[in-house]
Image: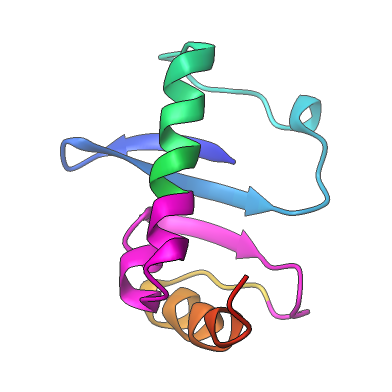
């Protein structure tokens, strides 16, 4: 994940399931390891609700989601939500 600070909250700006972290250069500010873990936990907690809107809300306005179980890039809230509707039906 790559995060951006948006509207007073950290949001996912880039999510690619098979890209190595060193391929994405972070922008300032750099987060601590604990902050990264906390942000991942927020995303994971959103998944646990099985509510696609809550998961999609973790993504920034200009997010790019390259999902694992779809070959269609998702670049806006509507399409990210749509992806998680189908993904969460599998109860990951």
Q: Residue at x 76, y 68 (%)?
A: 68
Colouring scheme, one of rainbow, by chain, secondary structure, one colour: rainbow
As for residue 48 lying within the magenta part, the answer is yes
Find residue 42 and report its horizontal and vertical position in percent. Answer: 38, 44
Name which residue lies at 51% across and 22% down: 27
Q: Nearer the viewer, residue 43 or 71?
A: 43
Placement of 43 over or under 89, stated as above or below: above
Front residue of this view, candidates 53 and 47: 47
Q: Is residue 26 above or below residue 65?
A: above
Q: Point out the stretch of residues depicted in magenta.
A: 44-72
Q: Residue 11, percent across and down? A: 37, 44
In-image side of 88 versus 54 (left or right): right
For image coordinates 54% across by 14% down, the residue present is 33
Quadrant occupied by the C terminus: bottom right
Q: How many marks?
A: 0
Question: Horizontal placement of 10 versus 89: left or right?
Answer: left
- Which quadrant of the view contains residue 86? bottom right
Q: Residue 14: percent from the left, percent from the top?
A: 57, 48
Residue at left offset 42%, top offset 20%: 35
- Where is 80 relative to 36, above or below? below
Is 74 part of what is drawn in magenta?
no
- Position of the N terminus, as image quadrant, is top right
Q: In the rendered image, which quarter is residue 22 located in?
A: top right
x and y percent of residue 7 in the render? 17, 43
């Amino acid at each position: 994940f790559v995060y951006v600070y948006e509207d007073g909250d950290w949001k996912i700006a880039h999510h690619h399931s098979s890209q190595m972290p060193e391929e994405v250069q972070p922008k300032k500010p750099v987060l601590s390891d604990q902050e990264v873990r906390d942000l991942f936990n927020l995303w994971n907690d959103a998944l646990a609700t099985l509510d696609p809107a809550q998961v999609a809300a973790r993504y920034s306005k200009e997010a790019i989601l390259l999902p694992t179980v779809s070959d269609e890039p998702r670049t806006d809230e509507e399409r990210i939500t749509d992806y998680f509707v189908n993904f969460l039906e599998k109860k990951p």
